[in-house]
Amino acid sequence: MQTTFTPAQLADPQIRESEKILRACVHCGFCTATCPTYVLLGDELDSPRGRIYLIKEMLERDRPAAAEMVKHIDRCLSCLACMTTCPSGVHYMHLVDHARAHIERTHRRPQFERFLRAALAKILPHPARFRAALVAGLLARPLAPLFAALGLKPLTAMLELVPRRVPPAETVFRVYPAEGAREGRVALLTGCANEALAPWITQAAIRVLTRHGIEVVVPPESGCCGSLVHHMGREQEALAFARANVDAWMREIEGEGLDAILVTISGCGTTVKDYGFMLRTDEAYAAKAARVAALTRDVSEYLVRLRLKPAVGGLRLNVAYHSACSLQHGQRVTREPKELLAKAGFVVKDVPEGHLCCGSAGVYNVLQPELAQRLRARKLANIDKVAPDVIAAGNIGCIVQLAAGTETPVVHTVELVDWATGGPVPQALATAYAETNDFAPSH
């Protein structure tokens, strides 16, 4: 793709990087077939290729984006299926992140949108605030029909996603010693939404790791990875979260050392693995961020290398493995979770159209509820085709999104591995089968 940026514009490292990405695009259109919004809407401007044209025009003209342009960029899920499909290696993720930051700086949204986005940015990255908001959401749930009647679809969507109960804080920021001889040492990112919505996922990961000889450190200074605000274009807030995590983990790296930095939330993992790029122009952090990014692994990448010690026999549950977009497209981790589940004794079922997003995508299911619900319905219809006993995913956003639309239990991959190696039955399974206390496969 030809570009017409001026030398003055190209002096900006962000513009220079985006120009390189734009020039890599050859207009082939392979990306359209795997783009969820194009599949649903059939609009070229709601495809990666169409959005690339819009972003090029916006950045070259160096002016605030028009509302129509913003609409199509906002509809992008950042699922990154286009990057998996692209034969030219177009790094769409960095391009759309730059576009969102430009929109956030220069475009004035309607008042309700500004309020909603600011509230999400100030609440979700902080577990205590998020937990308080969930309690408020439980109390406000009866008002969902009223909000729907008033046309406040994002508020209705938020209330529909609020879990039936709000879990207490569980994770303690400390060192969790290995059982027996220590064979490794890792840091674990607890995240923000994960700790408010499902802290038992972190606890399951800690149990599996320590049970297999791995010491786990959860530094108190680590927290939100920054992805929630990053994908809303709030660049400086995202970088502040990134720097705090880099500082926390570098103290451990330079102290007793780390074999890896593990992440149970694949959306966070994609962002942390990108810290080196995000902080590349920060002289104080560029090298440290690159080092942290190089050490970062999804928890499945690390666990699959360990020799599991199965403690529960005869599970053989049919597990529909939902491959989160951030894991399969963002991190290119596809084999490890399924191999891990199989090693733990489960029957793993691939989901048809597994490359398409479930509609979660961070806060997309709040900001774009209609599209998100259509994508969830399509995903669950495909999952039903494999008749699973349980659905496994590696991202809290996907878990919440899917659980809101199905009676089939939805759990994190690491919860199943924990159960198979001596841990408790995952909460969603225990609740679903409480009446029969029967965990044998039903199909």
Image: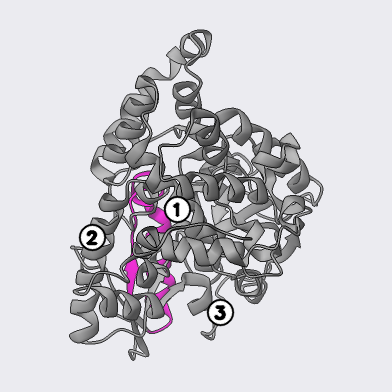
Q: Would residue 186 be seen by someone viewing this image from the given angle? A: no
Residue placed under numbered mark 3 in the picture: 304
Give above or below for 193 relative to 367. below
Q: Residue at 56% of width from left, 46% of height from top?
A: 77
Q: Are marks 1 and 3 in contact (CB under 8 Å)?
A: no
Q: Is residue 334 left or right of residue 33?
A: left
Chain part drawn in magenta = 186-213
Q: Quadrant of residue 73?
A: top right
Please state which amino acid type lies under the numbered disc 1.
Asp
Please state which amino acid type lies under the numbered disc 2.
Val
Query: 275 or 5: which is nearer to us?
Result: 5
> Mark 1 or mark 2, which has the lower sequence index?
1
Q: Would residue 48 be seen by someone viewing this image from the given angle? A: yes
Query: 18 or 300: which is nearer to us?
Result: 18
Q: Residue at 61% of width from left, 56% of height from top?
A: 392
- Taking the magenta stretch, the answer to whether it contains residue 199 is yes
Give above or below for 217 relative to 257. above
Q: CA distance from mark 3 to mark 2?
A: 26 Å
Q: Main secondary structure of the magenta part?
A: helix
Query: 197 or 415: which is nearer to us?
Result: 197
Residue placed under numbered mark 2 in the picture: 172
Quadrant of the image containing the N terminus: bottom right
Q: Secondary structure at mark 1?
A: helix
- Taking the magenta stretch, the answer to whether it contains residue 427 is no
Q: Residue 384 location in percent, x, y?
A: 77, 44
User: Which of the two discs, 1 and 3, sits closer to the camera?
Assistant: 1
